[in-house]
Image (cartoon, rainbow, N blue to C red):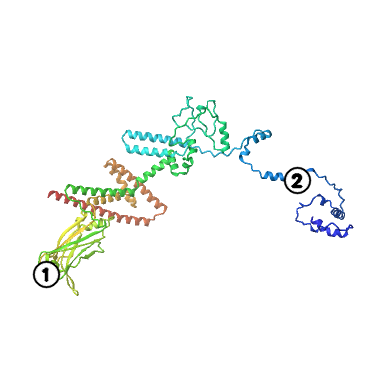
Amino acid sequence: MYLISGRARGSARNSRSPRTATPSLDWISTTTNGDDVDATDLNDPELLGELAALRSEMGLSSPPARKTPARQPSQNAAASMAFDEDDKILDSVEVTEEDMNDPGLLAELSQYGGAAMPEETAKPAKAPDNSALLEALNERTAELKSAALTAKRQGDMDIARGMLMQMKAVQEADKGFAMPPKPTAPESPTPKAPESPVLPAPGPRKPKTPDLATQPAPEPPVTSAPRVAASASQTPAKGVTSPAPKRTAAVSTPAQSSSTPGPTARVFLDDPQLQNLARVAVDFGAMTEQLELQISHATHKPRALEFHRYKKRAQADLATVASYQANQRLAPPARRDISVNELQIAIKRVVSDGDLEATLNGSADSFVQWEISWPRDKPSKAYARTIKFSEFDSGDVGLDYSQNIAIIDRQHPRPLMRWIERGRLVVEFYKYNGLLWGSQLIGRGSVPLADLRTRSEVTALVEMKAGADTSGTRGGKTLAGGPVFVDVAVRLRLPLSNQQEISEHEMDDIALHLDSMDDILSNAVLELELAQIPTRIQSADHDAASQLQELASAIKLRMSVVAAQVGAGTISIQDYMDGVTKELATAKDWALKAKRAMQNELSEMQSAMEAGEE
């Protein structure tokens, strides 16, 4: 069209026929698609003349005369309008699912293309087959039930109760499953409910015999309303009965699952606890893993040592209570105002049995001060309130003074207990000389604290002596005006410990260190220990011999580890020598501890023998 419109101007000038009624071709757009051009426009004489002139310039022969085709009846305008009206009517018609399944329409269509079938809806996906897992769970249930009955017959109700709880847990695991299909027909033709629940196989089934009364009803498919009506019309309406299976806690029939929203297989698949329970019930690897985990929890060494420590402490407390009960003594009170790591110093009263004015060299005021030299680097010291001279008219002044000091470490009580064997509470009596002259010491006394190892309170009426030493044990004499006493009490919430328990702990620690090969680095020491084991086995009993054999294996393993470290270069000769030197110092320290423990045991034995002779 562009070529035609471009040549139209040039050829129009040379054209012999005048341009009068026919418009120019310049108005034709190059972007039109030619939908408004018909056969009459193509047969225009002026257009044909232009095409003939163009062909003559290009040296082409003239085309044959074009014949105008006769109009077909279907191209009539009235007929086209009729078809348009039919299309509009068809577009306004709505076809439903019931119209497509109309029996009359299906009968007419069957004449052209065979028997027509109603359109079936898509069936839901079939649930996965869990029959093998359910059978394993049932076997596990039977085993647990048998074990529970056996334990009950033997009188062990704890094991029977545990087995019963495991059986209940396994029974809960298969609630969301349909049991594996095992359809069976009863022998008698009468419609009688079977003893065990029998579920039909999924999908419709055709009976082999016309006797439909002995066959279980097939599972109804899930379809739309017309499909259900059609399938219901095909089933017999009279003389057909189906047995109703028993309802159990673990199995739900198809009718029940369709009427009530019960558990499905998806519930089991989404519950991790049920999956883990089913896996443990059928997988030996999972069972082994669970048992090993229980053993690891039961044999955790730090936890076992902690419980052993609690046991020893409880046994010591039980022995103390039994001793108090046997001797008809009252148990020591547990004071709630004192913390477990605190020591309470109490000064109850001050008593004067003589001439206090001569003792104080006048009618001066006075006060009481106490001191305890623990911890060694930071001793504790304090004083009670000021005592007026006029308060001594009756000879007895009540102070009711108490103070708690946190000096006890219950986790590491040994240093304090060793100090407390010879430790003392020092009590001093002072008088005021005036504002500018300060105070003057009148007398000093002390209270031994060794009884706090096994008792929670120590009380004493301490006499103040002039010229006593700093510990209040040596030297000193009675005051000039007469004796002065201070009533003192030292309290704990609980006794520090039991001497027998502490000595046993020390001996146990020493024995564990001597039997452990992990801290020994010297190869010579390891060889010496290994050479002594056969002789020790010969003189030991059966249990000790097995422990010595385990010790020999540990020594060999330790020697191989040391040799591997030296061979691999992870430990040098200098490091080896430094380790041996450090090991020598540690062994000396443990030897001193063993010697001290033996001395404590000997002293206890001697004191017990002396008490028995008295």
Of all residues, the one furthest to the right in this rendering is 16
- For residue 592, what is the image quadrant? bottom left
The x, y position of residue 484, in whole percent, is: 13, 64
* CB contact under 8 Å: marks 1 and 2: no
Q: Nearer the viewer, residue 72 or 506?
A: 72
Give x and y (percent) for residue 550. Answer: 33, 44
Viewer-proximal residue among 16 and 600: 16
Q: Which residue is mark 2?
A: 80
- Residue with the mark numbered 1: 357
Label 1 SS = helix
Q: Residues within 10 Å of mark 2 (few under 14, many from 20)?
A: few
Q: Is residue 344 visible in the rendered structure shown here? A: yes
Question: Element at badge 2?
Answer: helix
Q: Nearer the viewer, residue 603 or 433?
A: 433
Farthest residue toward the bottom? 436
The N terminus is located in which quarter?
bottom right
Mark 1 or mark 2, earlier in chain: 2
Q: Residues within 10 Å of mark 1 (few under 14, many from 20)?
A: some
Query: Is 439 placed above or below 55 here?
Result: below
Q: Amino acid at mark 2?
A: Ser
Name the spot of residue 589 as percent of width and height, x first.
Answer: 28, 55
Q: How far apart are the two marked residues, 1 and 2, measured between alpha carbons?
A: 147 Å
Seen in the picture, residue 221 relative to 500 is either above or below; the reply is above
- On the picture, is 231 further left or further right than 15? left
Q: Is residue 446 above or below residue 64?
A: below
